[in-house]
């Protein structure tokens, strides 16, 4: 339910906030709001305060007496007057009792409060009689709380007022009431028995008043007491684990504890769920979380329990609880962010292991409390329980079971504390500490971590996780905080796993920590401490000793050597040492290491390290956060009668320790003390003492006051001490620390609010006797409340409170980041040196507040008087200290004040040349500081406006004589100019200006994401707040870097849902902001967030979205109230779809519901009102811009190099140029963090080790992820002896993997770069199999230059999947991607958790095949099987193997295939596995009607097509794109829908017309290169693209190019045209298969007949059995034959292996020609010639021929003869490259010598690299001559590097004539063969002109010299 400010607002807790007020004023709303924000948690529960039945049972007996009755009557009257009575609120019944009951009025008698009060005043009269309270309790239960009258969906409360001891028993009827869920409040006066009151009441809700007159004051507390009773706890899944091996009496005590605790809780399905496990020898699940959601039923189960003798197997019980109870199927709501709590109760030591199973339970997110009674083992309890927090203890030890009864209220409060800590405090505290650590700007921190054998691998992982979490709290950088890690045992891990100066960013640091492997051994901590001394000495030298140094020692056991001396040596060198001990660590040694107890931390288990992270980090960061703190701190100390002398001493010790840790001084921290009880007493004011010793002495002599607790009066009293008259200072932080143990007996909210409105931060510290609700009212923030079990725990709060004092919670922005700031400094003569120093101090204060470095904040400065001068540019200084030093050394220059000229001069600093980053989106800031009137004021406004119009924000700061109109003219707005009367006043401006700059600045945010804003549009928002919310969205967009790939979508909701903006690329901020401005509040009576979450999911499954593995899905939900429907399931559904949800609540919020939406407290944000939204802007954007780079799993790669041809003295890369060039790229690609394709939240990190054992100097075999470091280890490595690929070589590679490893499973991959095998293939196969059995996951080879016998590599390889026959060569253009694909694919299925692919539907069971038996062929080798099966598996029809032993096992499959669904009944379509793309035309002339027709046709085709619905490659996978001149993805292949889903997704595609024209050619090329990039591979996989077109395309050239590429890539295009497409028609003429189709449907209503040819001949085409109707008619002989000369690069540039491949390629290309049978005399048919260049003896200065003619145009008349010549006679010449001379010779000699020239002349140049330098001019001239003479020049470049001159060589358009390849291999030369076939078609049909028109004029002006004569 929502409440608008103008409407009814519910406010609780104090008299001011006890009633529902109509037309509540804003101020009152703000007064009540903080408490409302806190306690809306409970409103998610069915039993909320908005619905309660309250029965008042009032003593009217003779014991009370008629004289006292008026006091009781007045009490009842006042109490009801303060309660929120109403139909949907409290229903009240009044009953008077004595010997029987008398009902004054029923629950539904009065609906209005005034009627009740009138009845009480007039009709409520004393009756008299015996006092029989037990009877009254029984009758009330029967009358008001029994079925069917009882309303169990409402809270039920009974208030009993009694005056004496009952004549009958009250225990049994009271217990029946409590067991039925009725909460009892007992109030006693006169002779009432406290014991009887306690026996009746629920928990501690009993009150004994001394006198009847005390009832009057007590009445005002009753509303709060009732709500406390109702609201005792919030939402949790709570499981009790109970040892039942007890005697009966003790077991009854324990059952009573369980019953009382559960009775106090709000148990139902939506609030508290209870589980119960009992155990002795065996565990027994009594109640699951999902089964018992009714309190009375679970209480009945507890009553039925009986003790069970047996062993104490506590570990087994804990394990059973995790396995069987804390699961989603058992009712756990962990995925809905509901707190998971377990409470263990035992009385004896466990007889099985508890440590490991408890670790697993805590690791699963369960908070564990342990209660030990009698003989329970405290050490075991500590191992089981969660680690204590400063405010919470998790282990309770009792001496006897009788003590359990006193623990009920304590444990209820502990549970409440835990829930609220997780809900309100945890995430905020983590953020608070991180912002505080910003002040630790520079530090060198080493972790010294124990890696000894006593640490289990899982524990070592927990330790690494702790290190990673710690570093994320700091600003990591080379000039900021540096981290290093040293691991030790009885040795030091070398090289250091994380050197201090190697990693300068957080992500690399985390990777390096993850990469640490445990070294094992004994624990020699002293030796390790000695090792650290030179490391710190080096660090101090690097940073001139100006940076603090920290050493953090982490160990789990006793050091086996001395630690004290070595630790002292470090401390003498100014190294601050912290010691963290785990498990068996000895605390005395830890103190010796750290030097003082405050620097020692201890946890029982490694998984608890995360629980001390905040305390530990805040301890380190306090030094930086507190170094410059100025604060006035007042202690307000409760010294009422409830505080014992012992506890008062503990309070004083707590205060003294805080004082001791503070920086006390006249210009630092001041302290004052006031104590209170019934009155308040000043101990000393803020200014009385200025030293720690004086303050501590004054606190020591304090004595308690006694009396009662009037906290409200004390708050009013202490407020005066924050005024100047009592010594308070202006412009310093003001802190009040309240310490109390009891409930205030007066109103606290109003005086507390007054304090906070005066800027005073209030820390409220209370023990469990205090009222936590009051503490929250006093502090105003849950984070500032410290609610502890007893006074002993106060000491644990010291560091946290001190850190809060130094780092206020109110600061959202602690550091200015990413700005370019230029100061314009008035240095005129009117400013003296002292005043100038004040200006410098002001600037330095802003610099200190900034994160100065090249990537963050840059400062520049201009000084001016009469003439401006540049002081320093933005890019001159990159450290804070350098800028401060420059400012400090500056002097004024004197002269007049010409401010306009100075501002104009400053504009030059905002250029890239001077360091500006404006083009990178960094805000530009100018700060003008002046003290007088400008002499050029007339130009001032125009100059300033020019800068502002250019995107520069101007802050104008004026002092004394400055004119405000000039300041406003410069700034342009009121909020950007500041004025102070004196130079001293500048110090007060640094804070507001730095805060404003903080808001202006932005952190770098280059996310790739789809971001959807889901905003509340209900009535309660209002137009004003809706505008504020829209402005907030625009401010968020300002924080996102548009250079990143970001799509923005917006939807609005109330009781309806409206999509405002579909996901849209975020590139134009202004356009997007304009669309946000146009959004109108939809209004609505209800808030249906759950429904909105269901609808918004369409954004993230929509066919319109563009996804990649790196793209994050982000949803930001903003709401101002509670949802009227369920949010849990739809929110969880989104999270399961990998959507990150961030939830922002405004005003009165249901915090638990907000948590259920977000799923994590880290993504939940609350603000008091809409105006406060901007306060969370930076935190919110930082959170969702945070790079998600945590590694989920790791994989190890060992690389080996086998180069047998090398000899001693050679470099590793000798004669291996390609290896040297490609290896860095391969390493970089392999070690980049990878996202698992089927689970975007899972990442894989590969690390690489080198195994090189044949070098003079050893090569490190350390596993690394940094390419530079790996390559540096190979630099200048010299070979000692050749390597040999033999069995020993493989064994050496295997031994590079660590022998011992952690529990984390890692893939192990070997990659060998080899020039050939050097051992018997059978032995290598056996070794390969052996390594596979030992755990090697993949063995992959890469063929090097000069390799031999590499065909046999495939017989030892494994791990390449279906591409096991694909040979990897070092020259492949995509070698890095290919290797990465192999290792990622294997690791995805072998290493990483979670889904391993998209599961398909289960198929039908197949026929049983005949068994395959190899037993009759014992010598059958793996390569024999591979060779045999390979051809069979890739064939569409099963061919009989030549080997009968193999073929027998395949006969059944063959039989099954021939009788399957493909030949029975209607033939399925497609026959072959097919990848099908639809491209929808959305260009500017496409109407809605045309678009809908396209969509309809696409659906029709899909309905007639078999869709692939599983991983089995059968049927078609479908992708859909839209196009105009650009292409957008709508559905991707990877979305893998079944047919029904696919049809629905296509139906959901909405009509969105582009403003761009149509370019079908560009769209086709995009689809070919991108959409079909990652598709199913295989010999029979078909690729089909169906383009819809609504008209002519703009660019005919791009269409021809696209058809060329489609043909080359073996993609079949089809066009369904709604209008004529003649350009496409002409382009499709090159197809000879009959599959390239154009279907022109125009206005045909029945288009299905027209689609039949498309279905039969394209989509359903069977290459094995093509339909006769689909065969094209015999093509008419081409009248345009071709003379084609191939110029083959046969120089030494090409390797021998590559040359042989080129020969194979040439043979294949010949199939594209129709060779003339009579080349000498005939005029028909093509003729081909081949020449090679250049012979080894050719030089450009000689007359020798630059080519060798392999054969000319008339040599051969058949392809077969040409191919034989190529195979047998073409040899590599190994001369120098001379392409230009070869072309010149060809056009001057080869073509002229052949008579009967053909119409078209083509020269096809195959080039392996750049031509010789002396040939380049000839190349330029010869190519121009050839073009002018009508030759078509085609160029195939095979080099790795791109030769720009090739563009000049090839004919135009380049897309048709130039192909840039890598080293040629089979897949690529198939592409080239097909591409050339299309090129020849264009040539024959005159599509391209030779020479082109734009060259003809130039050609006509050129006179070419005659060709050179050659010998």
Image (cartoon, grey):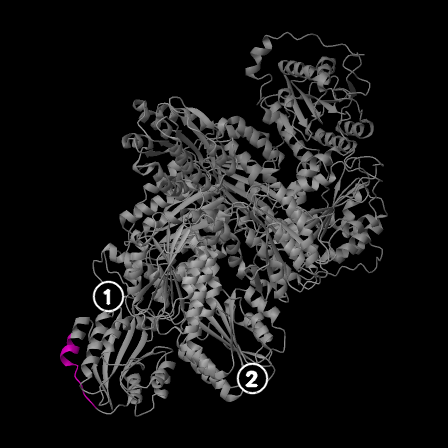
Q: Residues within 10 Å of mark 2 (few under 14, many from 20)?
A: many
Q: Which residues are magenta?
A: 118-128
Task: Please state the horizontal and vertical placement of residue 850, each as a whole percent of the image.
Answer: 46, 41
The picture quadrant where one finds residue 178 is bottom left
Q: Establish if 1803 lies above or below 1000.
A: above
In the picture provided, is 477 more to the left or to the right than 1819? Answer: left
Nearer-the-camera pick, 700 or 1636: 700
Residue at 27% over, 78% down? 55
Task: Please state the horizontal and vertical placement of residue 1612, each as a whole percent of the image.
Answer: 58, 38
Q: Quadrant of the C terminus?
A: top right
Distance from disc 2 to disc 1, alpha carbons, whole Å, reads 52 Å
Nearer-the-camera pick, 1370 or 843: 843
The reply to whether residue 234 is visible in this rendering is: yes
Label count reads 2
Task: Please state the horizontal and vertical placement of residue 48, each as a whole percent of the image.
Answer: 33, 69
Nearer-the-camera pick, 506 or 1149: 506
Q: Establish if 1681 lies above or below 1160.
A: above
The reply to whether residue 107 is visible in this rendering is: no
Task: Please state the horizontal and vertical placement of residue 261, each as a whole percent of the image.
Answer: 43, 77
Could you say which disc has been placed on residue 360 in the image?
none
Considering only order in the chain, which callout, 1 or 2, is on the residue closer to the N terminus?
1
Q: Quadrant of the N terminus?
A: bottom left
Q: Is residue 409 magenta?
A: no
Q: Residues within 10 Å of mark 1 (few under 14, many from 20)?
A: some
Residue pointed to by mark 2: 245
Cβ–Cβ under 8 Å for marks 2 and 1:
no
As helix, strand or loop, the secondary structure at mark 2 comes to loop
Q: Establish if 646 lies above or below 1276.
A: below
As helix, strand or loop, the secondary structure at mark 1 comes to loop
Q: Is residue 123 magenta?
A: yes
Residue pointed to by mark 1: 19
In the picture provided, is 153 more to the left or to the right than 1324? Answer: left
């Amino acid at each position: 339910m929502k409440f608008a400010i103008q409407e009814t607002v519910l406010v609780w807790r104090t008299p001011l906030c006890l009633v529902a007020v109509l037309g509540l004023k804003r101020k009152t709303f703000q007064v009540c709001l903080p408490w409302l924000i806190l306690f809306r948690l409970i409103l998610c529960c069915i039993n909320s305060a908005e619905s309660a039945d309250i029965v008042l049972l009032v003593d009217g007996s003779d014991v009370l007496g008629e004289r006292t009755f008026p006091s009781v009557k007045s009490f009842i009257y006042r109490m009801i007057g303060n309660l929120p009575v109403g139909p949907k609120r409290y229903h009240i019944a009044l009953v008077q009792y004595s010997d029987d009951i008398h009902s004054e009025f029923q629950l539904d008698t009065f609906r209005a409060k005034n009627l009740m009060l009138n009845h009480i005043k007039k009709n409520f009269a004393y009756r008299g009689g015996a006092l029989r309270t037990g009877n009254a309790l029984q009758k009330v239960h029967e009358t008001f709380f029994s079925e069917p009258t009882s309303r169990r969906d409402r809270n039920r409360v009974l208030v009993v007022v009694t005056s004496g001891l009952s004549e009958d028993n009250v225990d049994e009827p009271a217990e029946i009431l409590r067991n039925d869920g009725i909460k009892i409040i007992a109030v006693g006066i006169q002779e009432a028995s406290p014991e009887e009151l306690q026996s009746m009441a629920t928990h501690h809700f009993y009150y004994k008043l001394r006198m009847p007159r005390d009832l009057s004051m007590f009445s005002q507390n009753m509303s709060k007491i009732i709500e406390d009773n109702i609201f005792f706890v919030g939402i949790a899944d709570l499981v009790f684990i109970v040892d039942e091996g007890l005697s009966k009496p003790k077991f009854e005590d324990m059952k009573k504890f369980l019953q009382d605790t559960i009775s106090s809780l709000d148990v139902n399905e939506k609030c508290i769920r209870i589980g119960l496990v009992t155990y002795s020898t065996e565990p027994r699940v009594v109640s699951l979380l999902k089964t018992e959601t009714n309190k009375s039923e679970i209480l009945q189960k507890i009553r039925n329990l009986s003790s069970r003798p047996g062993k104490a197997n506590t570990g087994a019980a804990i394990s059973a609880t995790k396995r069987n109870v804390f699961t989603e199927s058992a009712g756990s709501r962990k995925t809905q962010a509901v707190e998971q709590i377990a409470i263990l109760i035992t009385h004896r030591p466990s007889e099985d292991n508890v440590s490991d199973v408890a670790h697993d339970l805590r690791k699963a997110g369960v908070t564990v409390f342990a209660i030990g009674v009698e003989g329970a083992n405290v050490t075991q309890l500590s191992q089981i329980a969660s680690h204590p927090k400063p405010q919470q203890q998790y282990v309770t030890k009792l001496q006897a079971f009788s003590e359990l009864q006193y623990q009920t209220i304590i444990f209820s409060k502990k549970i409440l504390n835990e829930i609220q800590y997780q809900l309100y405090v945890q995430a905020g505290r983590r953020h608070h500490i991180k912002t505080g650590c910003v002040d630790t700007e520079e530090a060198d921190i080493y972790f010294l971590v124990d890696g000894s054998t006593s640490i289990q691998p899982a524990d070592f992982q927990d330790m690494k996780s702790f290190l990673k979490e710690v570093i994320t709290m700091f600003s990591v950088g080379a000039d900021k905080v540096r981290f290093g890690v040293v691991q030790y045992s009885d040795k030091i891990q070398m090289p250091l796993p994380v050197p201090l100066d190697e990693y300068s960013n957080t992500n690399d640091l985390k990777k390096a920590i993850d990469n640490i492997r445990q070294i094992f051994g004994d624990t020699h901590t002293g030796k390790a401490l000695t090792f650290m001394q030179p490391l710190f000495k080096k660090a101090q030298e690097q940073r001139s000793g100006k940076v603090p140094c920290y050493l953090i020692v982490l160990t789990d056991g006793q050091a086996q050597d001395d630690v004290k001396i070595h630790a002292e040596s470090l401390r003498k060198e100014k190294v601050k040492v912290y010691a963290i001990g785990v498990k068996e660590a000895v605390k005395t040694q830890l103190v010796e290491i750290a030097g003082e107890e405050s620097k020692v931390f201890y946890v029982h288990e490694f998984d608890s390290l995360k629980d001390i992270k905040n305390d530990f980090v805040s301890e380190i960061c306090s030094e930086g956060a507190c170094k410059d703190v100025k604060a006035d701190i007042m202690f307000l100390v409760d010294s009422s009668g409830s505080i014992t002398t012992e506890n008062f001493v503990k309070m004083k010790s707590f205060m003294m320790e805080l004082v001791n840790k503070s920086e006390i001084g006249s210009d630092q921290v001041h302290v004052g003390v006031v104590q209170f009880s019934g009155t308040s007493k000043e101990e000393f004011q803020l200014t009385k003492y200025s030293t720690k010793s004086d303050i501590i002495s004054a606190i020591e002599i304090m004595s308690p006051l006694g009396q009662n607790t009037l906290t409200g009066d004390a708050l009013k009293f202490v407020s005066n001490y924050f005024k100047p008259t009592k010594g308070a200072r202006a412009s310093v932080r003001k802190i009040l620390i309240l310490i109390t143990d009891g409930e205030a007996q007066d109103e606290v909210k109003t005086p507390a609010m007054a304090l906070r409105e005066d800027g005073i931060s209030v820390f409220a510290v209370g023990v469990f006797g205090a009222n936590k609700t009051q503490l929250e009212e006093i502090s105003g923030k849950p984070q500032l409340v410290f609610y502890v079990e007893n006074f002993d725990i106060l000491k644990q709060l010291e560091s946290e409170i001190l850190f809060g004092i130094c780092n206020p919670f109110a600061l959202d922005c602690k550091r200015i980041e990413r700005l370019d700031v230029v100061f314009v400094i008035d240095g005129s003569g009117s400013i003296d040196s002292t005043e100038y120093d004040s200006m410098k101090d002001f600037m330095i204060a802003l610099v200190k507040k900034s994160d100065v470095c090249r990537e963050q904040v840059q400062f520049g400065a201009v000084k001016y008087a009469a003439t401006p001068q540049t002081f320093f540019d933005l890019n001159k200084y990159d450290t804070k200290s350098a800028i401060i030093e420059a400012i400090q050394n500056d002097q004024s220059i004197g002269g007049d004040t010409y401010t306009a000229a100075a501002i104009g001069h400053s504009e030059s600093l905002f250029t890239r040349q001077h360091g500006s980053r404006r083009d990178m989106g960094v805000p530009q800031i100018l700060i003008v500081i002046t003290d007088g009137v400008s002499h050029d004021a007339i130009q001032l406004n125009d100059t300033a406006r020019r800068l502002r119009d250019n995107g520069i924000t101007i802050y104008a700061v004026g002092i004394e004589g400055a004119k405000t109109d000039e300041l406003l003219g410069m700034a342009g707005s009121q909020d950007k100019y500041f004025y102070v009367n004196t130079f001293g006043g500048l110090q007060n401006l640094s804070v507001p200006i730095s805060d404003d700059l903080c808001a202006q600045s932005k952190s770098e945010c280059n996310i790739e994401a789809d971001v959807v804003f889901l905003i509340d549009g209900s009535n309660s928002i209002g137009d004003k707040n809706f505008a504020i919310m829209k402005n907030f969205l625009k401010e968020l967009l300002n924080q996102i870097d548009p250079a990143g790939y970001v799509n923005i979508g917006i939807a609005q909701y109330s009781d309806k849902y409206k999509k405002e903006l579909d996901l849209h690329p975020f590139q134009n901020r202004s356009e997007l902001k304009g669309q946000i401005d146009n959004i109108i509040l939809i209004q609505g009576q209800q808030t249906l967030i759950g429904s909105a979450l269901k609808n918004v999911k369409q954004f993230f499954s929509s066919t319109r979205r563009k996804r990649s593995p790196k793209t994050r899905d982000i949803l930001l939900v903003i709401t101002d109230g509670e949802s009227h429907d369920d949010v849990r399931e739809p929110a969880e559904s989104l999270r399961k779809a990998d959507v990150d949800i961030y939830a922002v609540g405004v005003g009165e919020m249901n915090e638990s519901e907000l948590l259920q939406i977000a799923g994590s407290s880290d993504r939940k944000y609350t603000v008091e009102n809409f105006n406060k939204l901007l306060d969370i802007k930076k935190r919110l954007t930082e959170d969702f811009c945070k790079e998600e780079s945590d590694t989920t799993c790791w994989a190890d790669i060992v690389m080996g190099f086998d180069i047998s041809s090398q000899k001693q003295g050679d470099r590793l890369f000798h004669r291996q140029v390609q290896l040297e060039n490609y290896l860095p790229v391969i390493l970089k690609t392999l070690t980049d963090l990878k996202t698992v394709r089927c689970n975007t939240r899972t990442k894989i990190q590969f690390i690489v080790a080198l195994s090189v054992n044949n070098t003079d100097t050893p090569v490190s075999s350390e596993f690394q992820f940094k390419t530079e470091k790996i390559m540096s280890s190979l630099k200048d490595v010299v070979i000692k002896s050749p390597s040999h690929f033999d069995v020993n070589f493989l064994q050496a590679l295997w031994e590079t993997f660590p022998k011992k490893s952690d529990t984390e499973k890692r893939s192990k991959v070997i990659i060998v770069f080899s020039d050939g095998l050097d051992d018997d293939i059978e032995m290598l196969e056996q070794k390969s199999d052996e390594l596979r059995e030992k755990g090697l996951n993949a063995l992959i080879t890469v063929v090097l230059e000069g390799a031999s016998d590499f065909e046999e590599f495939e017989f030892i390889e494994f791990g390449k999947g279906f591409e096991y026959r694909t040979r990897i060569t070092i020259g492949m253009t995509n070698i890095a991607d290919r290797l990465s694909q192999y290792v990622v694919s294997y690791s995805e299925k072998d290493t990483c958790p979670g889904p391993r692919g998209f599961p398909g539907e289960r198929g039908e069971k197949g026929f049983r095949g005949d068994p395959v038996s190899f037993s009759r062929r014992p010598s059958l080798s793996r390569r024999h099987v591979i060779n045999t099966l390979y051809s069979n598996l890739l064939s569409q029809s099963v061919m009989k193997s030549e080997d009968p032993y193999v073929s027998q096992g395949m006969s059944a499959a063959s039989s099954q295939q021939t009788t399957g669904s493909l030949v029975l009944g209607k033939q399925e379509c497609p026959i072959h596995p097919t990848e099908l793309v639809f491209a929808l035309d959305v260009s500017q002339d496409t109407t809605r009607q045309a678009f809908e027709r396209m969509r309809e046709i696409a659906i029709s085709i899909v309905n007639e097509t078999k869709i692939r619905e599983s991983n089995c490659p059968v049927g078609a996978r479908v992708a859909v794109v839209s196009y105009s001149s650009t292409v957008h993805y709508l559905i991707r292949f990877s979305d893998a829908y079944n047919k029904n889903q696919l049809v629905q997704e296509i139906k959901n595609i909405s009509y969105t017309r582009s403003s761009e024209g149509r370019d079908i050619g560009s769209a086709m090329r995009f689809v070919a290169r991108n959409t079909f990039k990652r598709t199913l591979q295989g010999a029979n996989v078909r690729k089909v693209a169906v383009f819809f077109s609504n008209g002519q395309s703009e660019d005919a050239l791009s269409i021809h190019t696209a058809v060329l590429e489609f043909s080359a890539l073996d993609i079949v295009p089809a066009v369904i045209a709604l209008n004529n497409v003649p350009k496409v028609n002409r382009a499709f003429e090159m197809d000879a298969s009959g599959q390239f189709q154009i279907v022109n449907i125009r206005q045909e209503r029945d288009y299905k007949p027209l689609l039949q040819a498309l279905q039969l001949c394209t989509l359903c085409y069977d290459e094995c059995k093509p339909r006769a109707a689909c065969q094209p008619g015999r093509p008419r002989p081409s009248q345009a034959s071709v003379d084609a000369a191939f110029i083959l690069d046969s120089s030494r540039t090409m390797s021998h292996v590559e040359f042989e491949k080129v020969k194979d390629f040439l043979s294949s290309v010949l199939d594209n020609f129709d060779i003339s049978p009579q080349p000498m005399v005939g005029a028909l048919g093509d003729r081909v010639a081949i020449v090679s260049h250049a012979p080894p003896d050719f030089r450009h200065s000689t007359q020798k021929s630059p080519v060798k003619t392999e054969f000319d145009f008339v040599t051969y008349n058949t392809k077969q003869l040409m191919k034989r010549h190529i195979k047998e006679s073409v040899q590599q010449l190994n001369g120098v490259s001379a392409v230009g001379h070869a072309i010149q010779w060809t056009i001057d000699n080869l073509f002229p010598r052949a008579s009967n020239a053909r119409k078209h002349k083509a020269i096809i140049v195959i080039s392996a690299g750049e031509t010789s330098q002396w040939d380049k001019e000839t190349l330029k001239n010869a190519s121009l001559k050839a073009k002018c003479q009508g030759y078509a020049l085609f160029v195939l470049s095979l080099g790795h590097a791109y030769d720009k001159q090739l563009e000049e060589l090839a004919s135009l358009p380049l897309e048709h004539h130039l192909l840039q390849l890598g080293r040629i291999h089979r897949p690529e030369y198939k592409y080239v063969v097909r591409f050339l076939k299309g090129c020849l078609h264009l040539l024959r049909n005159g599509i391209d002109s030779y020479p082109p028109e734009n060259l003809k004029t130039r050609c006509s002006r050129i006179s070419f010299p005659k060709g050179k004569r050659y010998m």
